[in-house]
Amino acid sequence: MASSSKAAQVRIAPSILAADFAQLGEEVCAVAAAGADWIHIDVMDGHFVPNITIGPGVVKALRPHCDLPFDVHLMISPVDCMIAPFAEAGADIISLHPEAGPHLHRSLQTIRGLGKRAGVVLNPATPITVIDEVMDMVDLVLVMSVNPGFGGQEFIESQLYKIAELRARIDAHMAAGGQSIDLEVDGGIDRETAPRAIAAGANVLVAGTATFRGGPDAYAENITAMRGSG
Ligand code: DX5
Ligand code: ZN
């Protein structure tokens, strides 16, 4: 499963879903100081997924606390009407699920038209082929290794094959002159699953529980363990 991109820098994107919501500003600063590369922000609406989390107002409030890219994962439907509010709030990368709206191509156009990087999220049961016709307009593919909605779930093994297959397709796309595409994995990432996701070809790891476990004194060691484990 090793790939030509395996040596590429591995980025760690802590999901603030596992942070202390009573002090999110401090938590974002703490993981940034501990070596995080991106801040992963899980947006849930209680409709597309069975949980409710963060709106654009919280993203806007966090923006002055941190210079790292904000990686905003939208688990909401309808989604198109909320792209601009999150872009204006300070998102740098905006990712959405193809099941969340009727016109994926249009949604990606909207994100890029706002000057943001566009991502497509594949649920465990969503086939890779959903991105075939939009490969030239995605900046990131996010493989869900849990069903979306909650942190702290168990890693779904079958998604390693999907990561490896996507790595091959992305490398072929880039070798043919296509744009750079990040391959991110989200859900159940810890010190044991991180090296396996990296070996399969992921270059960005989302980690909520495994980053925030142990409190601020443990963040740097938690992040280093996952990044270095490849
Ligand atoms: C699930 C979210 C994930 C989640 C990851 O819907 O997209 O980002 O917070 O949490 P852990 O790392 O605890 O599995
Ligand atoms: Zn997420």
Image (cartoon, helix red, strand yellow):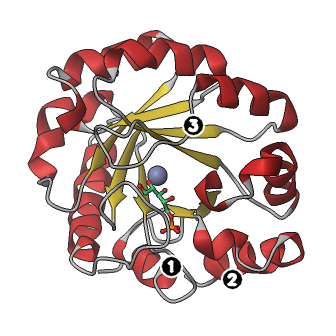
Total numbered labels placed on residues in the image: 3
Residue found 64% across the figure and 38% down from its top = 70
The residue lying toward the viewer, choosing from 213 and 138, is: 213
Q: Quadrant of the N terminus?
A: bottom left
Residue found 46% across the figure and 83% down from its top = 193
Residue under pointer 3: 54
The residue lying toward the viewer, choosing from 97 and 176, is: 97
Which label is found at residue 157? none
Under 8 Å from ligand 1: the CB of mark 1?
no
Please state which of the two labelled residues, at mark 2 or mark 3, is closer to the viewer.
3
Question: Does any portion of residue 115 appear in the rendered image?
Answer: no
Q: Quadrant of the C terminus?
A: bottom right
Which label is found at residue 225? 2
Sequence-wise first label, 2 or 1? 1
- Numbered disc 3: secondary structure: loop
Q: CA distance from mark 2 to mark 3?
A: 28 Å
Q: Is the residue 157 above or below the residue 135 in the image?
A: below
Please state which of the two labelled residues, at mark 1 or mark 3, is closer to the viewer.
3
Q: Is the residue 7 above or below the residue 54 in the image?
A: below
Question: Label 1 is placed on what type of residue?
Answer: Ala
Q: CA distance from mark 1 to mark 3?
A: 26 Å
Question: Residue 229 location in percent, x, y?
Answer: 60, 84
Residue found 15% across the figure and 52% down from its top = 128
- Locate residue 84 relative to residue 209 in the image: left or right: left
The residue lying toward the viewer, choosing from 9 and 36, is: 36
Residue under pointer 1: 194
Q: Tell whether label 1 touches label 2 (CB within 8 Å).
A: yes
